[in-house]
Image (cartoon, helix red, strand yellow):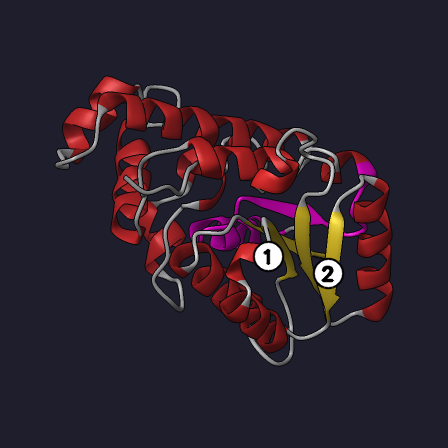
Amino acid sequence: MDDFSDRFPIGMRVLAVDDDPTSLLLLETLLRSCQYHVTTTSEAITALTMLQENIDMFDLVIAEVHMPDMDGLKLLELVGLEMDLPVIMLSAHGETELVMKAISHGARDFLLKPVRLEELRNIWQHVIRNKESQFVWSVELHRKFLETVNQLGVDKAVPKKIFDLMNVENITREDVATHLQKYRLFLKRMDSSGHFHNNTIRSFSPAGIVGNLNTPAGLNGQFGHNSR
């Protein structure tokens, strides 16, 4: 990203993955209209191979949740957690359970199809956050964060209380505060877009969020994924 840092987000390198050719073409067209550099593939396995061989060639990945060759959530986990690249998930379905599952697997955002241009204009922010942050919110830390917030209640959860209850080494109150802020912003956006009914997230038990997942995951995504 250093080669075009002065012009960023113009030229941001996006890998778009969707097995639906019509949706993929629309996504590519919209991304290019934002002046992003776009590479597309209809197969999750191909996307994974491209990333493994050319990890420095991409800044962000946008992928469909449901793909025939590999579960999109598995791709998300491999790319987001192991390669430390921001991943945004796409789907024509926006049920609360699916959204939370994607976020719990590390998605930076969850966009409903058809994707809107104004949504794609802002995705560069996830790349900036990825570069600037300093702390890794691992799978277990994300789970502990969720459990603590649910224990306190979203409205009553403040950084100091979360920090004290989590009682984790090598994490600062500032790390928790930043994580909580991004988490609340995400919930607000999801609520305003109609993903959640009133108080849905407040009654969402930790077991419902992280206990029924098919694979281990953390709330990396939107709420921070960094290394110290």
As drawn, the label of residue 69 is none
Q: 212 or 61: which is nearer to us?
A: 61
Percent x, y for residue 148? 26, 35
- Three-letter code for the amino acid on which mark 2 is drawn: Thr
Residue under the point 46% across and 29% down: 182
Q: Depth check: 126 or 71 in front?
A: 126
Question: How far across and how far down the image is residue 42, in percent?
Answer: 72, 72
Q: Is residue 57 left or right of residue 222?
A: right
Q: Determine which quarter of the picture holds residue 188.
A: top right
Dot 2 falls on a residue whose secondary structure is strand
Q: Which residue is mark 1?
A: 57
Residue 207 in the image: above or below residue 77: above
- Residue 195 in sight: no
| Residue occupying the point 83% across, 69% down | 21
Q: Nearer the viewer, mark 2 or mark 1?
A: 1
Q: Which residue is mark 2?
A: 39
Q: Depth check: 201 or 146 in front?
A: 146
Which residue is located at x 64 percent, y 37 percent?
Answer: 124
- Going from N to C along the chain, the mark reached first, 2 or 1, is 2
